[in-house]
Amino acid sequence: MIAIYVCAIIAVYAGLRVVVEKNTMRKLPFLNVVSFAISGTIALLLPHPLTILAAVAYFVGSTLESNAIASTWAGGIRRDD
Amino acid sequence: MIDVVMIASVALLIIGMVATIVNRDPFDKLISLSVLIAGVFPFIIDRGYLDVATATALIAPLSTIFTLMVCRRERA
Amino acid sequence: MIVTPEFVAGMILLIGGTVVTAFPRPKNYVTQLINLEIPGWGLLLVMLHYNESLALFTFAAVSVLSTYIFVRIIQKKEGA
């Protein structure tokens, strides 16, 4: 029971850090922290065997999204220079 | 649902919505939108719709990737 | 009828996102397209309150498809 509390509190803290941070590139590690914490919350929320599949799916999708944002941002800056 | 998880999810939803509205750069808006999406999934899991959560988690990043096609064109 | 937290959060997202999409602050298409995602997730939470499982599936799929169509329209309009 204490593990899901820790996951939820870490998610809210990392979400606040994402909002407070000014630099765009420094927001992305905290976004990954949010994704990991929500994946842990999903896996611990219900005592059902298929929950781990949903957690894996969310993990893969969120990592793909973060990588797409970072890749596009880096390519855009290189083209401007 | 467990109260702490419910309060954390609602907090993530509100934080993501306010940050998405306030930010002006498209990349900052997309990152904040990702925080908002993270707050939705514990509600879907808590209702027991594991298949819906799996499908939504796999097709939600496609929307962001399609939006990034416009952002790259905007910045270049 | 009991009011669940996903209904309240979904209604906040739906109303706030609709207002922001109607009046975008930097007035361009990209801001409007990103703001359009907010009421989409709010509507998904309201559907979750009424236990509409098939509606959740269909809406999540069609939302991505409509985003792709909007992207193609914006690219065509900016290229012309």
Image (spheres, coloured by chain):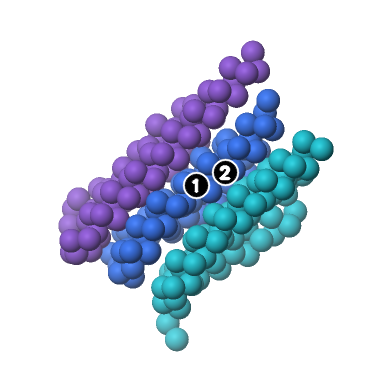
Chain colours: A purple, B blue, C cyan
Q: Is residue A51 toward the left or the right of residue B61 in the image? A: left
Residue B34 seen by the camera: yes
- Between residues A34 and A60, which one lies in front from this camera angle? A60
Picture layout, residue A28 above or below residue C7: above
Q: Residue A76 falls in which quadrant of the image?
A: top right
Q: Are marks 2 and 1 in contact (CB under 8 Å)?
A: yes
Residue A25 position in % (x across, y down): 49, 27
Check the picture and name the quadrant holding the C terminus of chain A: top right
Q: Is residue A44 toward the left or the right of residue B6 in the image? A: left
Which residue type does callout 1 highlight? Leu
Which residue type does callout 2 highlight? Phe
Q: Residue B76 falls in which quadrant of the image?
A: top right
- Looking at the rendered structure, the secondary structure element under dot 2 is helix
Check the picture and name the quadrant holding the N terminus of chain A: bottom left
Residue farthest to the bottom?
Answer: C1
Q: Which residue is mark 1?
A: B62
Picture layout, residue A26 above or below residue B19: above
Residue farthest to the right?
Answer: C80
- Between residues A39 and B74, which one lies in front from this camera angle? B74
Residue B11 seen by the camera: no
Residue farthest to the top?
Answer: A81
Task: Name the residue: 55% across, 61% down.
Answer: C62
Q: Which residue is mark 2?
A: B66
* Chain holding disc 2: B
Residue C3 position in % (x across, y down): 45, 78
Same chain for the residues at labels 2 and 1, yes or no? yes
Binning the other alpha carbons within 10 Å of mark 1 as few (below 14), some (14 to 19) or many (20 upward) gives some
Task: Name the residue: 34% across, 43% down.
Answer: A60
Picture layout, residue C50 above or below residue C8: below
Task: Name the residue: 67% across, 32% down.
Answer: B73
- Looking at the rendered structure, the secondary structure element under dot 1 is helix
Task: Name the residue: 52% across, 65% down.
Answer: C59
